[in-house]
Image (spheres, rainbow, N blue to C red):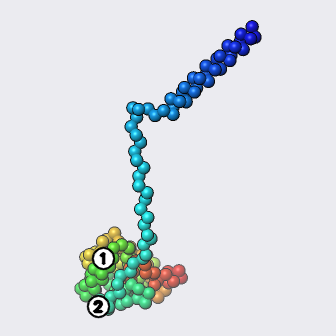
Amino acid sequence: MNQGADRFSRRLAVAAGLAMLTLAAQAQTPDPTLPDPAAAPPPPVQLTPLRPQTPQPMATPPQGLSSLPQGGFRLRMTGTELTAAQTAAIQALARNLAALPQGRITVEAQVAGPADDVSTARRLSLVRAQAVKSALIAGGLAPTRIDLRPLGRLSGAQDAVDILPPGVASPNAEARRS
């Protein structure tokens, strides 16, 4: 009886093995009803890194603006509104900056006072920065390329607005730390 059971077990094992081989062969055979897979996409394009672009230096800054040593321009502004000459100068500068294909322009505004009210100084510098931004937009510079930094009153206590092209560091960085 042992031999009969052994034969049956062997036959059962052989049948199971054959069934598994048949299933494995079917799994490797592609199904003719399925479509071919899509072709692989092309490899990504290799881009070269962009260098910061600065505008071509203007021969002389527009009247009403002064050039900063490390780049950029400074506007002396005591009120909250621009004069007609200042507006024209900023619009001329905006046309030059708009010719750059990319990059953000930073407008940093600071005020000379009041020394005892930080909130008022910050709000006044924001109003000045917004006035300059409006003139830059009117000159053709996209509003999404302009960043405002209302600095309030710094240690130098100046009534000035700096317009910094892409890649130009802030001349007020040291004063902001103190």
Kind of residue at disc 2: Gln
Q: Is residue 117 visible?
A: no
Q: Secondary structure at mark 2?
A: loop
Q: Quadrant of residue 122?
A: bottom left
Query: Residue 63 shows which numbered tag?
Result: 2
178 sits to left or right of 147: right
Graded by Cα atoms within 10 Å as few (under 14), some (14 to 19) or many (20 or more), the crowding at tag 1 reads some
Kind of residue at disc 1: Ala
Estimate the x, y position of residue 150 in percent, counting from the top left. 41, 77
Q: Earlier in the sequence, mark 1 or mark 2?
A: 2
Q: Quadrant of residue 107?
A: bottom left
Determine whether 84 is above or below 137 in the image: below
Looking at the image, the residue that sits furthest to the right is 2
Q: CA distance from mark 1 to mark 2?
A: 19 Å
Q: Is residue 9 visible?
A: yes
Determine whether 46 is above or below 69 in the image: above
Q: Quadrant of residue 10?
A: top right
According to the picture, the residue beneath numbered tag 1 turns out to be: 98
Estimate the x, y position of residue 92 in percent, counting from the top left. 27, 83
Estimate the x, y position of residue 30 in percent, counting from the top left. 46, 34
Judge by depth and name the residue closer to the eye, 59 or 158: 59
Residue that appears at 35% across and 87% down = 57
Residue that appears at 35% across and 90% down = 66
Are the residues tagged 1 and 2 within 8 Å (C-beta)? no
Residue that appears at 38% across and 80% down = 54
172 sits to left or right of 147: right
25 sits to left or right of 2: left
Q: Secondary structure at mark 1?
A: helix
Judge by depth and name the residue closer to the eye, 55 or 88: 55
